Image (cartoon, rainbow, N blue to C red):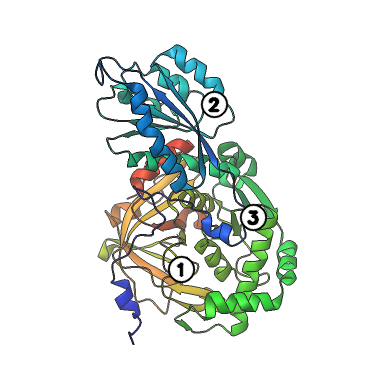
Amino acid sequence: MTSPLNRREFLGTTALAGGMLLAGGVALRPLQGAENAGWPKLPPVKIHVVYIGLGGAWPKPEFDAKAEVEKFKPYLDGLCQRLGDVEFTGGELIPNTDAAADEIVPKLAGEDALLIVHLAFGSGSPMLKLIDAGLPTAIFSQPFSGHDWMYVPQWQKAGKRVVLAASRDMADIDRVVALLRVPSRMSQSRILVVGRATGTKPACDAEKIKAKFGTEIVPINVEQQIAAFHAVDPAAAEAEAEEHWFKAAKKIVEPSRQDIIDGSRLFLALKNLMIENRAQAVTSTLCMSNPCNACLAFCKLNDLGLVGACEGDMDSTLTMLMFGYAFGKPGFITDPLFDTSKNAVIHAHCVAPTRMDGIDGQRHPFAIRTHRDDNSGAAVDVDLRVGQEITCAKLANLDTMLLSAQKIIEIPEFDDRGCRTQCTAEVADARTMLSNWGSGVLEGEGMMTLLHRVVFYGNHVANVRDMTQLLGVRVVMEG
């Protein structure tokens, strides 16, 4: 019989990439796990496709635009099947003229996004007319289609929500189409806020969130949460605990059996509240109590591809929603601290997903411990993967994404202090990052708002730049 991997052996193994990813590390159906668990399915994202350019000097005088379109159509049909949550509409082939673009603009009403396939040389002006219709837009431009690509950086600097895939590889269409879903999914999302919202001032303002991303906030008070908890059948909570926690944990240290069942009962209560309110995320300032701590409940939600965010942190909640829709990865909210002797940041918290690779990935080994701040309830100590590249991010003020690429180099041996799940991650320059913490974006904020960051498996920096362009958010590199 083969012995199971111990903690150190697991932490040193090489990761297998999750199977539910497309080229470029973007997600297939990021909400599939939630849908399988009973959450209602969101409608497909409607992406209007326009082919622009009939030929001329570039790519060549005898260019057959209609034949070129016929090459793309089956590819997009296949992509629609692979993604499973988009619908391609339109498909018009137009000359690269302003008049032709003007005829398309009215057809974009009611669509969620726009994909322009650049076929042949033009002035850039017709593309800009389409972009100015206001939809998040991606342009796929193969080499020798023309020189229209050179205007895109100017449009981006002007705040246009457009990204460019300048590539001969049609798989880059997969990447930009997957990112085009994010603004639509954010506008369809609802967040339960249990207790009160915390974070930057704009992120605590439901009207500003709605205006920026279309995301709705649903307030839930302590009485509603307690009532939902007591409405859950204790037998159902015990069955949930047995299946998801008792059978899977490598060990249970301090918590009682009832602590773990209570955590599962809170998960089922939050599940019912979320389904009732059509929500994809929940964050709570009551996560330490009332009626029990939410560590296990939030862990399970994150494992399903949803968002469970502690301490009412709206900035991190929105960040986790964006990354989940784009990359299918759950986020690990952390309280970072520096270890300059290793040129590193230590990430630590008592809520971490066990499926950091996504819903299709294997669960990491984990122990069930108490919540460390008060040595009560039940929380998770997850064995994160040494050698794993990570992206550390946080949306701030609804308009700026703080971002850095890091790499897990060890699991620190601080079992007697700090939060339960920990990892040490190498950064580009720890001393500079420490001295410039927050990069001037979080000046004057409270401790939690200044401190929290969210860790995701994988280096997503390049894709985040495109995702945020589509969302109207700037990127600031923290380290």
Above or below for 83 versus 386: above
Above or below for 169 versus 405: above
Q: Return the residue at label 2.
A: 108
Above or below for 174 versus 386: above
Marks 1 and 3, Cα distance to the nearest angstrom?
23 Å
The reply, left or right, for residue 215 in relation to residue 393 is right
For the point 27% across and 35% down, the residue is: 168
Res. 13 mark: none
Q: Return the residue at label 3.
A: 193
Q: Amino acid at mark 3?
A: Val
Question: Which mark is in front, 2 or 3?
Answer: 2
Q: Return the residue at label 1.
A: 354
The reply, left or right, for residue 276 in relation to residue 201 is right
Marks 2 and 3, Cα distance to the nearest angstrom?
34 Å
Question: How far across and down, in percent of the image, does residue 324 sit?
Answer: 48, 52
Q: Are marks 1 and 3 in contact (CB under 8 Å)?
A: no
For the point 38% across and 76% down, the residue is: 414
Q: Quadrant of the N terminus?
A: bottom left
